[in-house]
Image (tube, grey):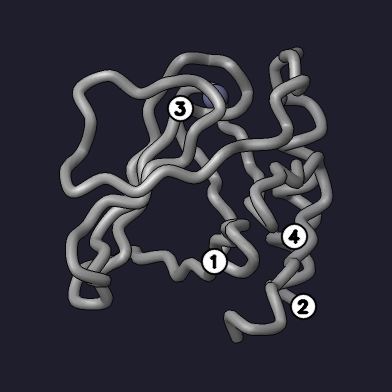
Amino acid sequence: MRALLNLTCRWVFNLFSKPKRSRKRSRLKLKYKDDVPELLEDDLLYVVGENGEYWMICFKCPCRCGELIHLNLLKEASPYWKFLVKNGRLSISPSIWKTTGCKSHFKIYNNKVKWFSGLFIRIRHPLLK
Ligand SMILES: [Zn+2]
């Protein structure tokens, strides 16, 4: 019951608090780097690490607000995200939900941005379970 109430409150909050923004940038490209780049290019997902050991994914927020997003991949720290590259396409789990600024909530699946609008829907990549 409490979970349902939380879900309803979140849905109502999102319904009225989401700023209008362009969501044209829906497909991203993948790039491997051994360190976090000083300048991040638009539409690129940077997977940061060396020798098959990756510790971070960083990119510009796809809503075009200009903020940088850094996702931790190390299980030792919380929160952390998992990623999967299949046929050169990246999927990240769980979803990315910014609690400040633009408050975007989205998922990256096969290099595409899947936006959550209002109602929270959990999508999991079958190989990331
Ligand atoms: Zn944003």
Disc number lying in front (4 or 1): 1
The relative height of residue 49 versus residue 123 in the rendered view (above or below) is: above
Tell whether 56 sits left or right of 126: left
Q: Secondary structure at mark 2?
A: loop
Q: Quadrant of residue 15?
A: top right
Q: Is residue 55 left or right of residue 24?
A: left
The quarter of the picture where residue 60 lies is top left
Q: Give coordinates of residue 14: x percent, y percent.
A: 73, 36
x 33%, y 42%: residue: 70
The disc, 4 or 1, on the residue closer to the chain's N-terminal end is 4
Residue occupying image coordinates x 61% and y 34%: 104
Location of mark 2 (residue): 1
- Report helix, strand or loop for mark 4: helix
Query: What crowding class fits label 2: few (fewer than 14 Cα within 10 Å), some (14-19), or many (20 or more)?
Result: few
Q: CA distance from mark 4 to mark 1?
A: 31 Å
Tell me which amino acid carries mark 4: Leu
Amino acid type, residue under disc 2 in the picture:
Met
**Residue that label 1 marks:** 85
Measure the alpha-carbon separation of dots 3 and 1: 19 Å
Give the left or right position of residue 87, taking residue 116 as reference: left
Q: Residue beneath label 3, please?
A: 60
Give the spatial CA distance, label 2 vs label 1.
Answer: 37 Å
Nearer-N-terminus badge (3/1)? 3
For disc 4, the marked residue is 7
- Tag nearer the camera, 3 or 4: 3
- What amino acid is found at the position of numbered circle 3 in the picture? Lys
